[in-house]
Amino acid sequence: MASIAAVTFDCYGTLIDWETGIREYFKTILREKGPKIEIEDFQAKWSEIEFALIQGGYQPYKTILRKSLEKTMKHFGLRYAEEDGELFAESMPTWKPFPDVKPALMEIRKRSNIAIISNTDNDIIQKTVRNIDVRFDHIITAQDARAYKPNPKIFRHAIKTIAAPPHRILHTSFSFRYDLNQARQLGFQTVWVKRKSERDERGKPDFEVVDLRGLLNIISE
């Protein structure tokens, strides 16, 4: 294994329990406006719309959140108000990290630089990092790169920011679609964190861990 210059992390879904955060907000929406709609169906449709939006021309993630919620609500025949989108964007920095995150990151940063590569805006990620309560050496956002994962542009921006060749960067994520497949194609070493996502049969991460504590064994090899 090549010596690691930095361990990079997807944030929402890998460090932050974004599925629970999203579900809690969607429960509020459906309780008020669509109590007969299954939350699983609503969330699946939102995920489809969000992914399509981030593959278009760059726009701030707060705009993506508002547009994706509006399109999802209209798909289900629900009345959308501007306040719904504003509250959705405001909720994102309040979503909580997984329990293993802070203690594992505190140990990992003793052995390597650590960084975030995230599909979000700078002001949102700064609030989220305060919730994680660990200092990162670099924070790379879609706002900085003007592109969203899986667009290779954001990963290339990360390589430039970290100032290390990709084979010396260990990228860690729960998601094949957003992160792991593209990072590996660009030469990153990759780690799949088995949160709540299923394996992509096309994906071939270099390592697999059940939580971030498993990274300690990898980076000590």
Image (cartoon, rainbow, N blue to C red):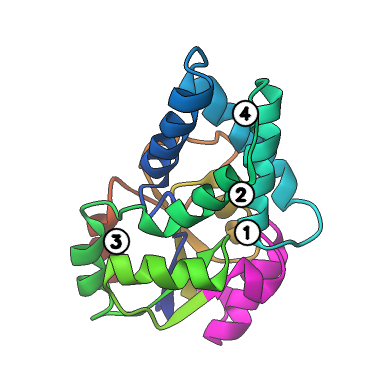
Disc on res. 215 = 3
Q: Position of residue 108 (x, y in %)?
A: 26, 72
- What residue type is disc 2 on? Leu
Rendered-image quadrant of the C terminus: bottom left
- The overriding secondary structure of the stretch rendered in magenta is helix
Q: Spatial distance from mark 3 to mark 4, Cα to Cα?
A: 33 Å
**Residue under pointer 4:** 45
Q: In the rendered image, which quarter is residue 49 located in?
A: top right
Could you tell me which residue is drawn at 32 percent across and 72 percent down? 130
Q: Spatial distance from mark 1 to mark 2, Cα to Cα?
A: 6 Å
**Residue under pointer 2:** 65
Q: Is label 1 in a helix, a strand or a loop?
A: helix
Relative side of 124 to 208, left or right = right
Q: Position of residue 22 (x, y in %)?
A: 45, 41
* Callout 3 touching callout 4 (CB < 8 Å): no
Q: Nearer the viewer, mark 3 or mark 1?
A: 1
Mark 1 or mark 3, which is nearer the start of the sequence?
1
Tell me where the magenta segment starts and ends, as one range: 140-167
